[in-house]
Amino acid sequence: MSVLIYAENAGGKFKKSIFEAVTYARAIADQNNTSLTAISIGDVDATELAALGKYGAEKVLHVSGDKLKNFVNQAYASIIAEAAKKQGADIVVLSNTFSGRGLAPRLGVKLEAGVADGAVALPEQSAGKFTIKKTAFSGKAFAVVELTSANKVIALVPNSYKVVETGGTAQVEDFAAETKESDFKAIIKEIVRSTDKVSLPDAEIVVSAGRGLKGPENWGMIEELAELLGAATACSKPVSDAGWRPHSEHVGQTGIAVSPNLYIAIGISGAIQHLAGISSSKVIVVINKDPEAAFFKVADYGIVGDAFEVVPQLIAAVKEYKASA
Amino acid sequence: MKILVCVSNVPDTTTKITFTDNNTQFNTNGVQFILNPYDEIALSRAIELTDNGKGSVTVINVGEVNTEATIRKALAIGATDAVRINAKPHDAWFVAYQIAQYVKANPFDLILTGRESIDYNGSKVAGMLGELLDMPSVSIIKRLDAGDSTATVEREIEGGKEILTIPYPFTAGAAEGVAEPKIPNMRGIMSARTRPLVAIEPVEVKTFSEIISYETPASRGQVKLVAADDAAKLVELLHTEARVI
């Protein structure tokens, strides 16, 4: 019995969401007085791998190979499942990223494991029951799910567990995994990564705007504020439906659910579908000229005012704060 | 091309979610159920790909008889026929297992789901089906172009996108961008009444998860308002009080 964490890399580096997942997996291993092994697939250098020890991994299995440089859902799932079996791991933890969501269900089937995707807290283990809290109804609620199988797969929502540095250096081992030809049917033609922008699903700060901005030409100030704060930009559904912003920025019940430390909503009324996608944000700031906007009811801080006057002032204030910090 | 679209019956997006029986049951009282919005996108794309006699679209749902209104909606949008596996959808594994048994007996070139259902947000069925049927799966696609023997899909990744080509058959979860949802027209609604909707019985399978209870997000305190001309105050509060910048 032990815990295995899949450490997904992005261009050879681990992101904060992975450190969260390793910290989280460490806590689960501690609950069960057992060890934590991480597995990394693709090209990651030895120093980066060993650094996973800081978050509590004792050992890191390193799988590399020409065909494994980039994420291949089927092949990666086969390798992680094989590693889990060889390590005797009965709990496999992933980060609930886009790739993690592809892996979790396949691992669930391979390992005959119950899958708790969208987990937001540590499992509770008592009287032989293993229960875990996960998001449900697109952020409008949580469900407490009992996993009744011997093996378990858990996918942790980014930004829902705090990174803790406890350990030192992990021992890195090469792991040779067998893959089948049929695991490589899907072929990657192109990967496009915008390097200058913060990725929305794992952003710590999100600056989001709605129809109150009146048109796509007015997004310059939103982008400027986001850049100053190191934030990702987002938008409401009517804005992406109108083609003012790409669908990938649509936050809400039928878009992306986010849980940043700070969510700044500008000119968004706060329809129930939008609120569903942002309800687990830690701090919510609302800027809206309508004092009756529903969004103020769920906000921590608010400014009643015209976005076209408030946002430039906010940009100036952030600049001043940064200059003095 | 034969396409299977897996659909679920979910609470309307405007639903205020509440629970009964000491927070152990979802309160369906007064709740309107709809075709899952992402499944609608998958279905709309499937119909576009098979237009003009280029194939057929079967919709499949695991649900009790009360989901038939939603299945009829899918037929009205333009699906060729429909299958309902007569069982309560216990969890994603149960649903995927039932659909996989059906597909083993009735093969398809392409199996689409929505990226997730808006009730339990699993995005698991497409991946589980892929594994059960030994096919590639793509969890969240933003574009789907069908060629003769392979399809080209665009997958979302953190801060970017990935373009893949995949030979049929495979499974994928459709998200916004794949198609504009189609609205049923009068002819569709009329013909939906007579299109085949077959109910079949489920097979037995052991499940691995149970929902024990529900929680609603903790409510926030009263909003703290800052004057419109005092943005500096907001920045100060975010720094010293909320400690988020």
Image (cartoon, coloured by chain):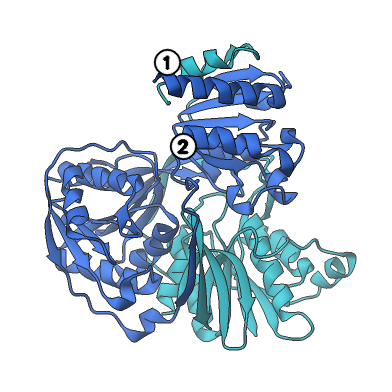
Residue farthest along the right direction in this orientation: B186
To which residue does mark 1 refer? Answer: B241
Residue farthest along the front direction in this orientation: A323
Q: Is residue B132 above or below residue A266?
A: below
- The quadrant in which the N terminus of chain A is found is bottom left
Question: CB atoms at circles 1 and 2 under 8 Å apart?
Answer: no
Q: In this view, does A55 lie to the left or right of B132?
A: left
Drawn colour of chain B? cyan
- Alpha carbons under labels 1 and 2: distance apart: 20 Å
Label 2 packing within 10 angstroms: few (<14), some (14-19), many (20+):
some
Amino acid type, callout 1: Glu
To which residue does mark 2 refer? Answer: A230
Amino acid type, callout 2: Gly
- The quadrant in which the C terminus of chain A is found is top left
Residue at position x 33%, y 69% in the image: A77
Label 1 packing within 10 angstroms: few (<14), some (14-19), many (20+):
few
